[in-house]
Image (cartoon, rainbow, N blue to C red):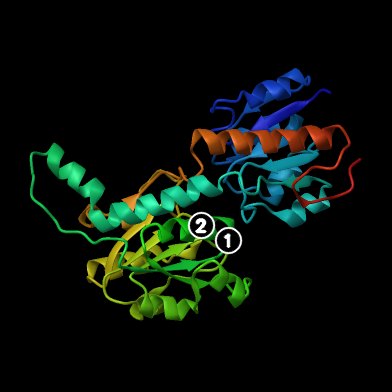
Amino acid sequence: MTGTVLVTSRSFSSGDVDVAAELTGAGLTVVRGPASHDLAELRGPLAEAVAWIAGTGRVGAEHFAAAPRLRVLARYGVGVDAVDLAAAAAGGVVVTNTPGANTEAVADLAVALLLDVLRGVPAGDRRVREGDWSVLRGRELGPLTVGVIGFGRIGRAFARRLTGFGSRVLVSDPLVPADVVRAAGAEPESPAGLAARCDAVSLHTPGGTTLIDAEWLAAAAPGLVIVNTARADLVDEPAVAAALRAGRLGGYGADTLAHEYAGDGRSPLLDPALADRVVITPHVGAQTVEAVDRMGSLAVADVLAVLAGREPAHPVLQEART
């Protein structure tokens, strides 16, 4: 087996398992590229790549057009909303992902962000380092009603963790039957109902639609906390910032921002005036040793399968290969 495998995931093969060695051991050459998927930087590697292990950056038709030898794009993670699947199909490229690999890691982070916002952990740390030991009272998670938008693997794992705190859980997911939600110990509810009834809401649904906008926020219960470990476009960031400044929202915690690769701090949620109520992590939801190993192993296995002419275990898009 010969050819170049382009890797643009930041954490690929950085856990306990050397999955890159599986590729080189099979006779393949591993080339690293930027996580932003900047085409100017990727054009050279894409021209030679037979496989691409891609992170969260956008993969558009122009990327596929620059990769005439590409046979498989293995999405290092679950979501494929950033991948132009039509362009992949047109180019005969197999698209795969790694379902379930980062479920526990992202659910853990969602709980951590919720607790950080409720108790002001990062803000307290900053004050202590500046010699300020003043106290700001927070809220306990147990007595709260927490809404979950999206009840797939991660949403269910997040809700399962809340049972240990004693929280009441409401769920909005049109694709999951009400009896399934109730069997998990939660209550079905509409998105609008979550705004009015919940003390906190956590997002665990695919991107593509803005769910948290000015209208939704206007109907929210006072002091509501929002957590987003899913996709930045689910949230109207200027509207959330305005609600925080007006005191309508209690806080916001997220693992993603709309311009996370721009490096210019354009999000209004990064306003220093909001720092005590906003906690942002640099897209680290899947960044645990265990999740990195699982994602890498699943992605590599599917790359090797496709290049060997076999069916991948986790196809998102399966096209005829030449």
Q: Is residue 65 left or right of residue 294?
A: right
Q: Provide residue 263's location: percent of width, then percent of height.
A: 40, 43
- Residue sitting at x 30%, y 67%: 143
Q: Earlier in the sequence, mark 2 or mark 1?
A: 1
Q: Provide residue 274's location: percent of width, then percent of height.
A: 24, 57
Three-letter residue code for mark 2: Arg
In the rendered image, the vertical position of residue 161 relative to residue 2, given as above or below: below
Q: How dense is the environment of label 2, judged by Cα within 10 Å: few (below 14), some, or many (20 and up)? A: many
- Residue sitting at x 43%, y 62%: 202
Q: How dense is the environment of label 1, judged by Cα within 10 Å: few (below 14), some, or many (20 and up)? A: some
Q: Provide residue 221's location: percent of width, then percent of height.
A: 31, 77
**Secondary element type, mark 1:** loop
Q: If the image is split into quadrants, where does the C terminus sit?
A: top right
Q: Is residue 10 visible?
A: no
Can you tell which mark lies on residue 256?
none
Q: What distance separates the C-alpha of mark 2 from that of mark 1?
A: 7 Å
Three-letter residue code for mark 1: Pro
Q: If the image is split into quadrants, where does the N terminus sit?
A: top right
Can you tell which mark lies on residue 231?
2
Q: Is residue 295 left or right of residue 236?
A: right
Q: Is residue 318 visible?
A: yes
**Secondary element type, mark 2:** loop
- The answer to whether mark 2 and mark 1 are in CB contact below 8 A is yes
Q: Nearer the viewer, residue 111 or 266?
A: 111
Q: Is residue 8 left or right of residue 256?
A: right
Residue on which the image places disc 1? 206
